[in-house]
Image (spheres, rainbow, N blue to C red):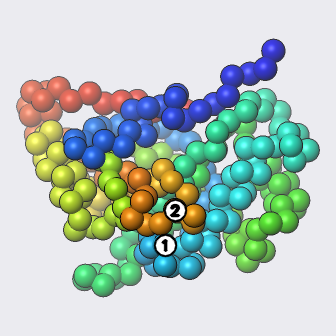
Amino acid sequence: MINKEINWQADDPEEYTHDTNKGSIIDLPTRSYIVLSGVGKADPNNRDFTAKADALYKVADYLANAPDNNLEIEGYTPFKRYPLQAMWERVTPGRDAEWRYQLMIRQPAFITKEILQTAEFDITNVDQQYLWDIRMLHFSEGLEAQIGNNGVLTRIGPANIKLQKFIQDAGYRSVASESWHMELYLDDVVRTPGDQWHTILRNGIEPMDVSKVVETKIPIFKGSK
């Protein structure tokens, strides 16, 4: 019997919703990711960003298609490659701030550090300067508010304004300015023009007005492991 494919779009629709009109709240557990870091902006004209994204896509595709690549993985179940996401941290202040990012693509639990290391020796279509910097990370996003966006995300853009209002109205406060924020790219950022990107902006949150949190009754969607 062939195992059912793991499909993030079908299995976790609340987590990957691209609703640009109203926000939602999610609580995500610790998961495994392959990651690659850089400095710059999420811009289709930023060659370093797109080159690193392309490298991560190719490694993720190789792992997702393990049987076709003669890569033996205990407990392997067919899965649809997860979308690219990036954790952003501001390095310098101001409008022209410099940003540090960590590109991430989620992996099922059966993709381990050892599996990644084995695959890296066989992958031939990824630039070596990027390939050997890709590593496995176990990370929990935790409690977050999110909202969809069309095009490249900006910190002062309409998506962020909507998200901050949603957070406040729901009785929470954003902790993004104190640590990091997350962006998801539902399209291939290498091959899709930036103005056609379907993106999701996420901010870590914590309760600020408990009575308002109770009153609004906004559901918290629990992410799968």
Up-down relation of residue 147 to residue 182 (above or below):
above
Up-down relation of residue 98 to residue 15 (above or below):
below
Please indicate whether residue 134 sits to the left or right of residue 177 in the image.
right
**Residue 217, quarter of the rendered image:** top left
Horizontal and vertical percent position of residue 35? 61, 60
Up-down relation of residue 181 to residue 129 (above or below):
above
**Residue 179 showing in the rendered view:** no
- The three-letter amino acid code for the residue at tag 2 is Thr
Q: Earlier in the sequence, mark 1 or mark 2?
A: 1
Residue closest to the far top:
1
Crowding near pointer 2: few (<14 within 10 Å), some, many (20+)? few
The disc at residue 78 is none
**Residue 152, quarter of the rendered image:** bottom left
The disc at residue 44 is 1
Residue at disc 2, secondary structure: loop
Horizontal and vertical percent position of residue 211? 8, 31
Horizontal and vertical percent position of residue 212? 9, 34
Q: CA distance from mark 1 to mark 2?
A: 8 Å
Would you say the residues marked 1 and 2 are in contact, meaning their CB atoms lie under 8 Å apart? yes
Q: Residue at position x 57%, y 78% from top?
A: 48
Residue at disc 1, secondary structure: loop
Quadrant where the N terminus sits is top right
Q: Residue at position x 27%, y 46% from top?
A: 20
User: What residue did someone put label 2 on?
Assistant: 192
Q: Residue at position x 30%, y 38% from top?
A: 25
